[in-house]
Amino acid sequence: EAQVTQNPRYLITVTGKKLTVTCSQNMNHEYMSWYRQDPGLGLRQIYYSMNVEVTDKGDVPEGYKVSRKEKRNFPLILESPSPNQTSLYFCASRDRPGGSYEQYFGPGTRLTVT
Amino acid sequence: SQQGEEDPQALSIQEGENATMNCSYKTSINNLQWYRQNSGRGLVHLILIRSNEREKHSGRLRVTLDTSKKSSSLLITASRAADTASYFCATVYGFGNEKLTFGTGTRLTIIP
């Protein structure tokens, strides 16, 4: 089954404790991205990657890091989480730049930073 | 920002009725997409309409696009309880990143 998986689905942590949210897709997609969803603000892009070893900032990259060492994986790293990073996070992937525009989303990770 | 805005923010209708949601955006686009999100879950792609298209159909969905007004509408006909969800429009602009820029969504409730 074609899918994007994220782990963990729920996470409660404390300010400053480094964490990683994993994302993996099994569709051989080149393009992957991370979004956060906040009430009243919709979804905003954090980082994106057009291929292995190619990553760039989205609209709200502050406080986040990413890496793309393998095509299927695109982890999101919060080096020192703060309460304003409490949010619902989604990983997404799609075929390739210039290809099908349909994006496939993971199930989401609900993060709470206290 | 070319973030889209959906209208209305919330909509409740009886099962079997048609539901119409509108989306406005600010700048030129390559295409516009609609996604559905069931409560707290991932988004599911519904339909894509390109900037040179005016109308598109997929099952019970009908999407229109008016680039001169920078607006789109999503019509769901013969609504079902399972259509209860939030609906987002997302625009794609430029090349390379081609990121989705989402609106704030319409919360649709279908009353059985």
Image: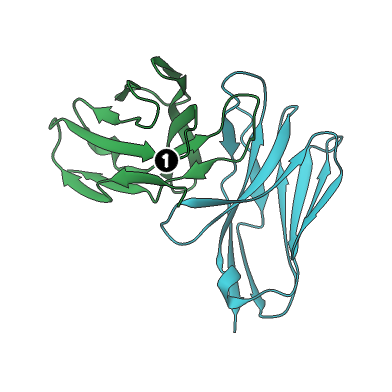
Chain colours: A green, B cyan
Look at the picture and state if A49 lies above or below B105.
above
Circle 1: residue type? Asn
Q: Residue B83, position in %: x, y?
A: 60, 69
Crowding near the residue tagged with mark 1, few <14, some 14–19, many ≥20 C-alpha atoms within 10 Å: some
Q: Residue at x 81, y 50 (%)?
A: B56
Whether residue A41 is visible: no
For the C terminus of chain A, give its image quadrant: top left
Chain of the residue that carries numbered disc 1 in the rendered image: A
Residue under circle 1? A26
Residue B68: quadrant of the picture: top right
Could you say where residue A87 lies in the image, as x and y percent from the top left?
Answer: 34, 44
- Tell me what residue is drawn at x 13 percent, y 39 percent: A14
The image position of residue B90, as x and y in percent, is 63, 40
Residue at the image point whose x is 66% and y is 57% from the top: B8
Q: Is residue A113 left or right of residue A36?
A: left
Residue A93 lies, with reference to residue B42, above or below; the image says above
Dividing the picture into quadrants, the one containing residue B110 is bottom right
Marks counted in the figure total 1
Which residue is rendered at x = 71% and y = 80% of the image?
B16
Q: Nearer the viewer, residue A81 or A33?
A: A33
Q: Position of residue A106 (x, y in %)?
A: 41, 46
In the shown orientation, is residue A14 left or right of residue A77?
A: left
Q: Does the image show residue B42?
A: yes
